[in-house]
Amino acid sequence: MHIHLTAEDRQQIEAELRARRDVLEGQRSRHLDGVSRAEHARELLLQDGDDAPQRDVDRAVDFARTDRDAVALAEIDMALERLAAGQYGLCTDCGSAIAPARLKLAPQVLRCVACASLLERGRPKPATL
Ligand SMILES: [Zn+2]
């Protein structure tokens, strides 16, 4: 199965994906302030103060946020690859066409609604840090 996209469609989708990617990249580098994740963690750990419990929470939230950004970036990259390979718009799990309305809302999605909700339900609770 494959989805027919005109050159114009492809260009538009690619532009949309790249725009989203830029936003995410910007957020991520601003958030980490240019330092690597490990350095960032070290800085947080070395911070003085008697608010240790709060700091732990902050740290967990911090990691969760950068993880989510990293996943979102990887998703967009994959969507771009699939676009180049002519597989854009097909579910990576079952191979059926993803609803156009869903792609319009979130051009980076890789799975159809059915597979996405299956994954969502089967996913283990994120481990608390
Ligand atoms: Zn599917």
Image (spheres, rainbow, N blue to C red):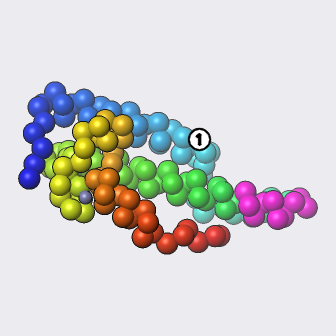
Look at the picture and state if 67 lies above or below 34.
Answer: below
Q: Is residue 108 left or right of residue 52?
A: left
Residue found at the very far top of the displayed protein: 8
On the image, the x and y values in percent for residue 9 come to 18, 31
Q: In front here: 128 or 62? A: 128
Regarding residue 54, the answer to whether it shows in the image is: yes
Residue 128 lies within the magenta run: no
Q: In front here: 4 or 34? A: 4
Assign the magenta stretch its main secondary structure. helix
Q: Is residue 31 left or right of residue 122?
A: right
Q: Which residue is mark 1?
A: 30
Q: Quadrant of ligand 1?
A: bottom left
Q: Is residue 13 left or right of residue 73?
A: left
Q: Which residues are magenta?
A: 49-58
Residue at horizontal 47 percent and vertical 42 percent from the top: 25
Residue at horizontal 28 percent and vertical 48 percent from the top: 79
Regarding residue 17, the answer to whether it shows in the image is: no
On the image, the x and y values in percent for residue 54 come to 81, 59
Indicate the amino acid at tag 1: Arg
Q: Is disc 1 placed on a helix, strand or loop?
A: helix
Residue at horizontal 40 percent and vertical 40 percent from the top: 21
Which quarter of the rendered picture does the C terminus lie within? bottom right
